[in-house]
Image (spheres, helix red, strand yellow):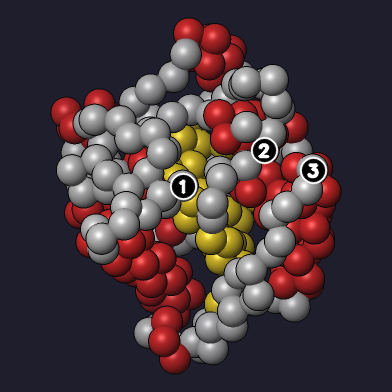
Amino acid sequence: MPSLCIKDQRPRYAKICSHAPLDCEGLPEIVLGELSEQAKDLVGWRKIPVILGGEHTITAGALGGFGLFKRPVGVVQFDAHADLRDTYEGSPYNHACSMRRVLDYGFDLFQIGVRSLSLDEAVFRRDHQIGHLDAMDIAGNGVPSSILPDDFPMNIYISIDVDCLDPSLMPATGTPEPGGLTWFQMAEALETIISGRNVVGFDVVELAPIPGFHSAEFTVARLIYNTMGVISRNLQA
């Protein structure tokens, strides 16, 4: 689990530290609790945690470590799916429930790139007034110059499910959906939401490597590094 300490606009000079992988064997509640403790340590050390997965469920665990923040933290989710189910396949810790668990913590949520959700999720999103910029909106109108509402928290945590990208670019994921973001739409959206705000952490999840097909893995690696760069430049601005 890398932590990024920003001292230079280029991430490779920013003292990137890597933690040993977390052992994810065992009950989800226990694993998520251990992840929360690791994230809490990094937050206490004034680092920026970068969590790499794996199941999107890890987002709820990572965010459990942000109780030290005195000011509100908003979560910006890049995803093909809303992930707002209360339970799925008998578990509240399924990846389809990840953002519902985030809401249980009391975080504000804004969704970008969604193009697949159940009727119940659509009703829940409407009734709870969850902000969103769906993939169809981006396809029709491009990335707007302003995305997050004015009253959205200044401190943000970004959760990137790689299936937010179009499967022509990112086929190596468990639940690909047609009609996703292009590389440059993703880059523009990240630049827009990060500008003027304080990123306290981010995760990148749901890569499912295809043996012998390396471009998807490199795409995710570049996405992680580029996100670090946007954060760094924003802090220097």
| Mark 2 vs mark 1, CA separation in Å | 17 Å
Residue 203, image x, y percentages: 53, 56
Residue at horizontal 54 percent and vertical 55 percent from the top: 53
Closer to the eye: label 3 or 1: 3
Circle 3/circle 1 CB separation < 8 Å: no
Q: Residue at x 48, y 28 (%)?
A: 82
Quick check: 115 left or right of 215? right
Q: Residue 234, located in which quarter of the rendered image?
A: bottom left
- In front here: 19 or 80? 19
In this rendering, does residue 90 appear at all?
yes
Q: Say which residue appears at 46% left-offset and 35% top-offset.
A: 111
Q: Which residue is mark 2?
A: 102
Q: Residue 218: give its label.
A: none
- In the rendered image, residue 65, in percent from the top left (x then y), is placed at 76, 57
Q: Earlier in the sequence, mark 3 or mark 2?
A: 3
Q: Please name the amino acid that badge 2 sits on.
A: Val
Calculate the distance from the C-alpha at mark 3 to the C-alpha at mark 1.
19 Å
**Quadrant where the C terminus lies?**
bottom left
Q: Amino acid at mark 3?
A: Leu
Q: Amino acid at mark 1?
A: Glu
Task: Identify the disc placed on residue 206.
Answer: 1
The reply to whether discs 2 and 1 touch (Cβ–Cβ < 8 Å) is no
Near-viewer residue (100 or 217): 217
Q: CA distance from mark 3 to mark 2?
A: 18 Å
Q: Is 30 located above or below residue 219 in the figure?
A: above
Please state which of residues 187 and 51 is positioned toward the viewer in this rendering. 51
Quick one: label 1, few (<14), some, or many (20+) residues within 10 Å?
A: many
Q: Quadrant of the N terminus?
A: bottom right
For label 3, the residue is 27
Local crowd at mark 2 within 10 Å, few (<14), some, or many (≥20)?
A: many
- Number of residue marks: 3
